[in-house]
Amino acid sequence: MENVKTAIAEIKSRGQLTIPKKIRESSHLEEGQVVSIIPVGESVIITPKRLELDEARRQIRRIMKASGLSEKELLKGLKDEREALYRETYGKKGR
């Protein structure tokens, strides 16, 4: 994380807290991402919670949307990559 100074934020009536943009960017926090809030004495630490499967799903959805790939095209590409990796690692398939 780059050196970002402490920021001030207000907790709204429903408990909502806006994390300042510079801190979100330097911490790589994105909309919809889950964070852990850890009580430490009378303070708290807010840290990204890495839900690997959920995070992978989000990234795949973003990539598919940005590239215009269909699910079928993505799965075919994965199959092709797996077969190429198998051939590279073990030689011809089905000896």
Image (cartoon, grey):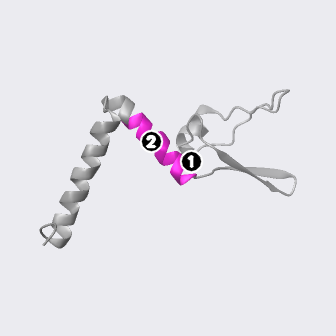
Residue 59 inside the magenta-drawn segment: yes
What element does badge 2 sit on?
A: helix
Q: Report if residue 89 lies within the magenta region.
A: no
Q: Residue 70 lies in what quarter of the image?
A: top left
Q: Residue 3: which disc?
A: 1
14 versus 35 height, above or below: above
Q: Position of residue 50 (x, y in %)?
A: 58, 52
Image quarter hosting the C terminus: bottom left
Q: Is residue 87 above or below residue 59?
A: below
Between 29 and 73, the one lying in front of the other is 73
Q: Earlier in the sequence, mark 2 or mark 1?
A: 1
SS category of the residue bearing label 1 = loop
Q: Residue at x 37, y 37 (%)?
A: 63
- Tag 1: amino acid: Asn
Percent x, y of residue 78: 28, 49
Q: Give the extent of the magenta segment.
A: 51-63
**Is 83 on the left-hand or right-hand side of 48?**
left
* Residue 1 at least partly seen: no
The residue lying furthest to the front in this view is: 94
Q: Amino acid at mark 2?
A: Gln
Residue nearer the viewer, 45 or 78: 78
Residue beneath disc 2? 59
Residue 23 left/right relative to 59: right
For the residue pair 53 and 26, the one nearer the viewer reads as 53
